[in-house]
């Protein structure tokens, strides 16, 4: 529903670059324009030194960075980006689960990235960062068609082109959903739920 990994169809999970090692449903309390998220207990997780973390369907890429030291996860969770706030506000208004999704951090120094806008059977390259292989437009169009068939909605898809030429799905983002602001939302991370 909100393009979180938990909602991805199997056809897209099969082509994901990283599969999460943890998806933690966050308890929260929503009251008018106040959203309190309960800090998760991460003590039982065997976390690597750094992780790729997402709050809802968005990473912290637009803020301090998508890669986070494991010891800083709670501090990161206490400070969502404006884009994350817009989406978690919508998620909480729908009474849907808010997920903290953790994947292994990945070295992208030899991986080419391409951001695609996929809408109604059309594909447009929004940005690219060539670090390894150049982009094969035919393969990219086929991959975009695969994504479009699996989802019945417009998206921004981040694609990785691996050194061997394989394509993988890095991330899905809602198209246009994060341009709005959640300026009236008061967000806080609390240590325990209020009873």
Image (tube, rainbow, N blue to C red):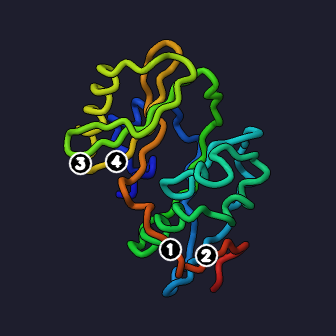
Local SS, label 3: loop
Residue 122 seen by the camera: yes
Q: Secondary structure at mark 2?
A: strand
Residue designated by label 3: 152
Q: Where residue 64 sits: x, y (%)?
A: 68, 52
Report whether residue 16 is seen.
no
User: Is the residue marked by circle 4 packed among few (<14), some (14-19), or many (20+) residues within 10 Å?
Assistant: many
Sequence-wise, the earlier of marks 3 and 1 is 3
Crowding near the residue tagged with mark 3, few <14, some 14–19, many ≥20 C-alpha atoms within 10 Å: few
Q: Give me the residue at 53% from left, 81% from top.
A: 184
Which element type, helix, strand or loop, lies under badge 4?
strand
Mark 4 against mark 2, which lies toward the viewer?
Answer: 4
Which residue is at 23% across, 39% downward?
122
Mark 3 vs mark 1, CA separation in Å: 26 Å
| Residue 155 - label | 4
Q: Which residue is mark 2?
A: 187
Of labels 4 and 2, earlier in sequence is 4
Q: Nearer the viewer, residue 64 or 129?
A: 129
Using the numbered discs, state the Cα–Cα distance from disc 4 to disc 3 in whole angstroms.
9 Å
Of callouts 1 and 4, the N-terminal one: 4
């Amino acid at each position: 529903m909100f393009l979180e990994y938990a909602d991805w169809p199997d056809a897209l999970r099969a082509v994901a670059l990283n599969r999460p090692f943890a998806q933690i449903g966050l308890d929260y309390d929503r009251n008018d324009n106040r959203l309190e998220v309960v800090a998760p207990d991460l003590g039982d997780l065997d976390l690597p030194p750094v992780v790729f973390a997402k709050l809802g369907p968005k990473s912290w890429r637009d803020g301090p960075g998508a890669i986070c030291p494991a010891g800083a996860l709670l501090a990161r969770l206490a400070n969502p980006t404006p884009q994350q706030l817009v989406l978690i506000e919508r998620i909480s208004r729908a009474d849907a689960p808010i997920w903290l999704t953790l994947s292994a951090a990945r070295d992208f120094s030899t991986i080419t990235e391409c951001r695609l806008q996929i809408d109604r059977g059309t594909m447009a390259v929004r940005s690219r960062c060539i670090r390894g292989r150049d982009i094969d437009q035919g393969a990219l169009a086929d991959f975009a068609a695969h994504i479009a068939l699996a989802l019945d909605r417009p998206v921004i898809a981040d694609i990785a082109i691996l050194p061997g030429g394989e394509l993988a799905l890095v991330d899905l983002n809602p198209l246009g959903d994060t341009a709005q602001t959640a300026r009236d939302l008061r967000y806080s991370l609390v240590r325990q739920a209020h009873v």
